Amino acid sequence: MVRWPNWNLRMDVTLLSDVSAWQRLGGADTATEIAQQPALWESLAQDLSRARDRLQAFLGDSLNDPNQRVLFTGAGSSGFIAEMVADAINAQWPAEVRVVHTTSLLTHPALYLQRDRPTLLVSFGRSGSSPESVAAVDRVRADVDDARFLDITCNADGELARRGAGRADTCTLLMPSASCDRAFAMTSSLTCMLLAALTVFDRSSWDARVARLKQVAALAREGQAQWDAPVATLAQGPFNRVIYLGSGPLEALARECALKVLELTAGRVLALANTPLGFRHGPKSTLDGNTLVVVLRSVQPLARRYEQDLLEELRRDGVAGQVLAIGPHSDIGADDEYTLVVPPLHTAFDDPWLAPVWLGFAQLFALQRSAALGLTPDNPFPDGTVNRVVKGVTIHHG
């Protein structure tokens, strides 16, 4: 279900499939990379099935060892992937699964590494060449006696893939080649790496994991078809502030959604992220008539009740320009604006698995808002002050 914005705006919106229009607007790569995601996830399911034996041989029985530490890591959007998946994976295995951004691992390694504790570092990297990603591997290899590395990356020619080749302590898992985004912002690269991690580390049968991945792709395809035009219209609204709210694993999704707005609008639209419960503790003061608030709905009934309380409060207050919700259809929040009916396959579709579906909404909005502001979404920073692959980082040792 979609409820359209309630203001009168021009309706000559550019749809995601209009490649020639996006070429004129400087956003063809971003639009293509958003649109291709469901198909890429289906390709990913096939790639993972082919890599199954290799992955299982590398992981062995390590996840059943309570002394085993697994660190999911990355920087920026890649770090948000780690945040979205780590808790759900930790809940399934005796091993200790934690998330630590490379940007913290490099500055405070003693807080996360123990020399005598077996450690698997799972790195996410679109390019696989950011200075922090490479340095994090070097740091763990130097500081942990029994260290191994699973590099989930989109770039076969990146530093992670090249440096890990031929090493017994390293397994490189490459995403479909088209996921190595050409555009500035991470879109299909992020969702492929996220779903790959969930598939590899899930405890259910392999066939069940692959089937779930394909069903997530089908949901995302449905979402794109339903949301394309309404989101394009929404993005023409007078919003100079956007706030995404999510709980549990969806808090990291909210941060990624906000980052997409900041990146693609070159900071012209202030975007923030928080939790529905945390929002009242100060951040609510950011609301004004030009603020769009988006609540990312959980599949968990308990979380949804907290979300519903805040949604009703914000709508009663009438301060924000618009308040809307996106997520699985449910009796709790039956009037949510952007919903999809999620198949009731027991608990298979938990929040991390559905996060890429809801992220599609935020990617669409950021793309359209960028174009509405007259920017070029494929490269919002033509002066080079912010780069696709981070530059200017000096790695220090000590």
Image (spheres, rainbow, N blue to C red):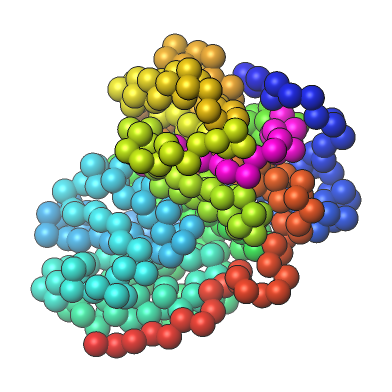
Q: Look at 43% across and 39% down and name the residue there.
A: 285
Residue 128: where, in percent of width, then height?
50, 72
Figure label count: 0
Q: Which residue is at the front of the view, 364 or 69?
A: 364
Vertical comparison of 305 with 103: above or below: above
Q: Give me the residue at 17% from left, 60% from top.
A: 68
Q: Quadrant of the N terminus?
A: top right
Whether 344 is drawn above or below 360: the answer is above
Q: Which residue sits at x=35%, y=63%?
A: 101
Q: Is residue 347 visible?
A: yes
Give percent across and percent down for residue 81: 43, 53
Residue 52 appearing in the image: no
| Quarter occupied by the C terminus | bottom left
Residue 40 position in % (x across, y down): 62, 49
Q: Residue furthest bottom?
A: 397
Task: Give the x, y percent position of residue 217.
Answer: 58, 37
Say left or right for 340 vs 142: right
Is residue 101 highlighted in magenta? no
Quadrant in the picture for residue 136: bottom left
Q: Which of 40 and 393 is in front in this view?
A: 393
First to last magenta residue range:
230-249
Residue at (80% x, 29% y) in the render: 9
Q: Does the magenta stretch include residue 235?
A: yes
- Left or right, 52 with reference to 36: left
Decide if residue 101 is on the left or right side of residue 154.
left
